[in-house]
Structure formats: structure tokens, C-alpha cells
């Protein structure tokens, strides 16, 4: 990207992101070994890892941007686009899969109008698949943030969302 365009972006939408990134990184010394805690700190502050933050971390620790990005993509805990206020996780581990987890996922995708891995337009919900969350006896399991819904049937997809957000 040409640097003039980059500066304009930073001055407009990027200014706040830049401030949040700097705040999140202020406690670090800039060692390479701090890359994961730095990524976590930025994500805790902003909710995801914008390109500008990856670049700033790379500059701080003297590592190529591609390597910092590569490190972050290795871990499923990191997100690279804005997230919804709540995350709906559909378990597709073995126990949940054999008890209809995929049907529940499809019902939620239809209800939310998005696919797994995406966020609703109003940024209320993000939807993702996870592997066993340790509640196999309740399979199939859906989690909305920390709330666990067990033995969910596909026809209950809307109800699960409603319990998490009455406006649904
Ligand atoms: S497989 Fe879903 S909770 Fe274990």
C-alpha cells in the first residue's frame, strides 16, 4: 500500500485502533518471546487483530509482519476481523456430531443468515464450530459465550439465540 493512502487510513478509521493497540502494547518490552502475549493483549483490547496491530507488533519486536501473522493464524484463539457481541459455538466433536450437531449448526446458520466462521451484519453474534467442550453427556451442545445449552434440537436454534438476546 502506498504510504500516503496508509496515512489517510490511519488518520480516519485507524486512529482509534492505533491508540487501542498502543495502549495494549504499552506494558511490553518488545522481546520476540512476547509475541503471543502481545497478540492476546491486543485482541483483549480490540476484540480481534487488525492488520495495523500485526504491523505494530512486528515493528516492535523486529520480526517480519508475515511471521507475526503466521504465528497468530496457528492459534484458533485469534480472530482477524471484528467479532459479534456474543459468540455462538456449535460443538461438532464426535459425541455431538453423531447426535445431530451438524443439523443444529445448519439450523443456526439459517436462523442467523450467516455461515460458520462469520459474524452477523449487526455484530450481535459470531458463529463458529468447536470440537469437544467436555460436556459429551449433554450432546449435542451449543455454547453462547459461557452459557451451555445441552441436548439441543435443530428446531430449538431460534430459542437458543432468544435466550441469549431477547431481541432476536
Ligand atoms: S463432543 Fe461435544 S461436548 Fe464432547
Image: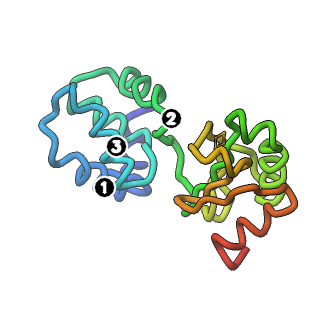
Q: Which mark is drawn over residue 135?
A: none
Residue at left offset 79%, top offset 61% = 157
Give the residue pinned by disc 3: 40
Q: In this view, does 1 lie above or below 154?
A: above
- The label nearer to you, 2 versus 1, is 2
Looking at the rendered structure, the secondary structure element under dot 1 is helix
Residue at left offset 43%, top offset 49% = 9
Q: Position of residue 162 (x, y in %)?
A: 72, 72
Give the residue pinned by disc 2: 76
Quick check: which quadrant has ligand 1? top right
What's the CA distance linking mark 2 and mark 1? 22 Å
Q: Position of residue 92 (x, y in %)?
A: 70, 39
Q: Is residue 73 above or below residue 7?
A: above
Give the residue pinned by disc 1: 20
Sequence-wise, which precedes: disc 2 or disc 3? 3
Residue at left offset 73%, top offset 42% = 96
Give the side of residue 28 with respect to residue 77, left or right.
Answer: left
Toward which corner of the image does residue 37 lie, by quadrant? Answer: top left
Bin the neighbour count of mark 3 within 10 Å (Cα to Cα): few under 14, some 14-19, many 20 and up: many
Toward which corner of the image does residue 116 lie, by quadrant? Answer: top right
Locate the C terminus by quadrant: bottom right
Between 163 and 122, which is closer to the camera in this rendering? 163
Q: Position of residue 28 (x, y in %)?
A: 16, 41
Q: Where is residue 79 in the image (x, y as percent from the top left)?
A: 50, 42
Check if mark 2's residue and mark 3's residue have beta carbons within 8 Å.
no
- The label nearer to you, 3 versus 1, is 3
Amino acid at each position: 500500500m502506498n504510504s500516503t493512502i496508509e496515512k489517510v487510513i490511519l488518520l480516519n478509521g485507524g486512529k482509534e485502533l492505533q491508540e487501542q493497540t498502543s495502549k495494549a502494547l504499552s506494558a511490553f518490552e518488545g522481546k520476540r518471546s512476547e509475541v503471543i502475549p502481545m497478540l492476546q493483549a491486543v485482541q483483549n483490547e480490540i476484540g480481534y487483530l487488525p492488520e495495523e496491530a500485526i504491523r505494530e507488533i512486528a515493528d516492535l519486536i523486529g520480526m517480519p509482519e508475515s511471521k507475526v501473522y503466521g504465528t497468530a493464524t496457528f492459534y484458533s484463539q485469534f480472530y482477524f476481523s471484528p467479532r459479534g457481541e456474543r459468540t455462538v459455538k456449535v460443538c461438532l466433536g464426535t459425541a455431538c456430531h453423531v447426535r445431530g450437531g451438524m443439523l443444529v449448526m445448519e439450523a443456526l446458520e439459517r436462523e442467523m443468515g450467516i455461515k460458520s466462521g462469520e459474524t452477523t451484519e449487526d455484530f450481535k453474534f459470531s458463529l463458529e464450530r468447536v470440537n469437544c467442550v467436555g460436556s459429551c453427556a449433554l450432546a449435542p451442545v451449543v455454547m453462547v459465550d459461557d452459557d451451555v445449552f445441552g441436548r439441543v434440537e435443530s428446531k430449538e436454534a431460534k430459542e437458543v439465540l432468544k435466550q441469549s438476546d431477547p431481541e432476536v
